[in-house]
Amino acid sequence: MNNTAPTASQITVHAVLLGDRLAADRTGQSGVISMAPLCYRKGEGYVVVFRYGAAVLVGLSQAQEDETLAQLAGGAAPPIPVEEERLVIMLAPGLEEGVVGAGRLQLRELTPAHVLVLADVLAKSIALARYEREIASVFDTIEPAAARLASSGRVPRARKALLQLVGEALLAQHRVSGRIAFAEKPEALWDHPELERLYARLEDEYEIIERGTLLNGKVGVIGTAAQTFTDMIDTQRSVRLEMLIVLLILAELVMAMVTLFLP
């Protein structure tokens, strides 16, 4: 009797964030597995495309990856990813499914449902990484304005920068809360509840809920700061308008008095 464990094969997974949105041609693809997100076969591998700009390539060669990314970006050459992450899948029937170390995952088999679950987590992870950097840069913008307000009690004179801050805060809120439903589970789990445990492990490994919750908290702080600065700018403008009105009234009274008393 042969007790030798089966040899594990390796499959490379490459998750890339190409931009804010991806509109893949759904009608021109063969071997479509899912429409939301779009998942289809590419040779022996898979391609999963998310509307918020992420694509997950499973088991593709470098040439296939370059071709796919160029097609998704609508160009002749593959674009430079905004964010990316790689994962190696160890595939063998005797393995216990779960994450093993950084960037390695053990699976007994790789079904389309496995691909959809894995792609969901990786796509959220790279999208959150991008927004984490963006939120950090917004905080860098807030800090000097808040420091000036704390030291002098005055709103910074660079009103354009403050208005840009308000715009960045609104954009961050839209991206984090609207585009990435980080707390929602993939629809594949409805048909394959046996993958709940794997999804929970992956979600925990990449800290999806924790990172998304923290980002939402930071976005709330940014929104409050932006609203505060906006209110202060509006108040200053109102005071200036009132002063101008008073000055105009005084000027009119002076002109009337001059007209009255001068022969």
Image: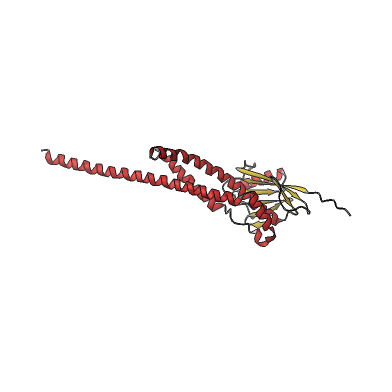
Q: Is residue 97 left or right of residue 145?
A: right
What's the residue at 32%, 44% (across, down)? 239
Give the image's coloring scheme: secondary structure
For the N terminus, the image quarter is bottom right
Total numbered labels placed on residues in the image: 0
Q: Position of residue 221 (x, y in %)?
A: 48, 47
Spot the residue most to the bottom.
191
Compare residues 74 and 40 and report the one nearer the observer.
Answer: 40
The quadrant in which residue 108 appears is: bottom right
Question: Can residue 21 be seen in the rendering of this structure?
Answer: no
Compare residues 196 and 82 and report the one nearer the observer.
Answer: 196
Question: Can residue 209 be seen in the rendering of this structure?
Answer: yes
Compare residues 216 and 152 and report the one nearer the observer.
Answer: 152
What's the residue at 61%, 48% (across, down)? 125
Spot the residue most to the left.
263
Q: Position of residue 117 (x, y in %)?
A: 66, 54
Q: Position of residue 215 (x, y in %)?
A: 54, 48
Q: Position of residue 238 (x, y in %)?
A: 33, 46
Q: Is residue 194 left or right of residue 146?
A: right
What's the residue at 53%, 53% (across, down)? 178
For the C terminus, the image quarter is top left
Q: Is residue 136 left or right of residue 43?
A: left
Spot the residue most to the front.
151
